[in-house]
Image: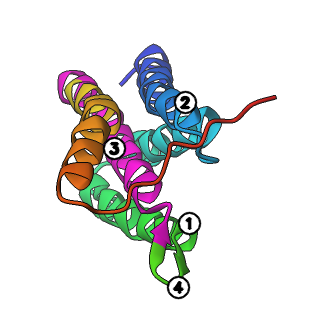
Amino acid sequence: MTEIEMIIRLVVALVLGALIGIERVHAGKSAGIRTLGLVAMGSALFIVVSELVLQKYGAVDADPLRVAAQIVTGIGFLGAGMIIFKEDHISNLTTAAGVWVAAAIGVATGFGLYAIAIAVTTLVIITFSLMLRIEVFLKRKFGQKTEPRKRIVK
């Protein structure tokens, strides 16, 4: 892998994570462009570095798939810290899931799987925007309480 390819992988991961973050900012969530962009890029960096170590030193104990597994564990811990439980309400669960999938997008990009990373990013944005409308509609139809979307106004 060349240095240009490494940089491309990192930039693509950052951009894809940031695109998901744009929707989260639109939804008024605190984990936005920078957070999701950094999560995706950081995940890609761990994969790129593990592949470089494997490439440079050959058959050492540096399996990129084990690194990917540890990313899942670390992001799970980060996501768990984002979730807030109140009396009868859970907050930030969807945003935590977004952080988790941003890490997965970063891993895919780190491995150079651009098509799947772009496809998943598109699906995440559709899930956050279109499926929210469907969810709100169904909750109203079945008489469940819905919360209005918070927007950041400055």
* Mark 4: few/some/many CA within 10 Å (<14, 14-19, 20+): few
Asked if residue 94 is among those painted magenta in the image, a careful observer would answer yes
Q: Which mark is residue 26?
A: 2
Residue 86: % across, % down: 55, 80
Quadrant (top left, top right, bottom left, bottom right) of the N terminus: top left
Q: Earlier in the sequence, mark 3 or mark 4?
A: 4
- CA gap, disc 3 to disc 1? 21 Å
Which residue range is magenta in the image?
90-118
Picture quadrant where residue 126 is located: top left
- Looking at the rendered structure, the number of numbered marks drawn on it comes to 4
Q: Amino acid at mark 4?
A: Glu
**Gap in angstroms between the C-alphas marked 2 and 1:** 18 Å
* Residue carrying label 3: 107
| Mark positioned earlier in the residue sequence (3 or 2) | 2
Closest to the camera, between mark 4 and mark 2, is 4
Residue of label 4: 87
Q: Which mark is residue 140?
A: none
Of tags 2 and 1, which is closer to the observer? 2
Question: In 3D space, how far apart are the residues under numbered discs 1 and 4 (Cα atoms)?
Answer: 17 Å
Which is nearer the N-term, disc 4 or disc 2? 2
- Kindly report which numbered mark, 3 or 1, lies closer to the viewer in this rendering: 1
Left or right of residue 108, residue 99 in this image:
right
| Foreground disc of the pair 1, 4 | 4
**C-beta proximity under 8 Å, tags 3 and 1:** no
Q: Are marks 1 and 4 in contact (CB under 8 Å)?
A: no
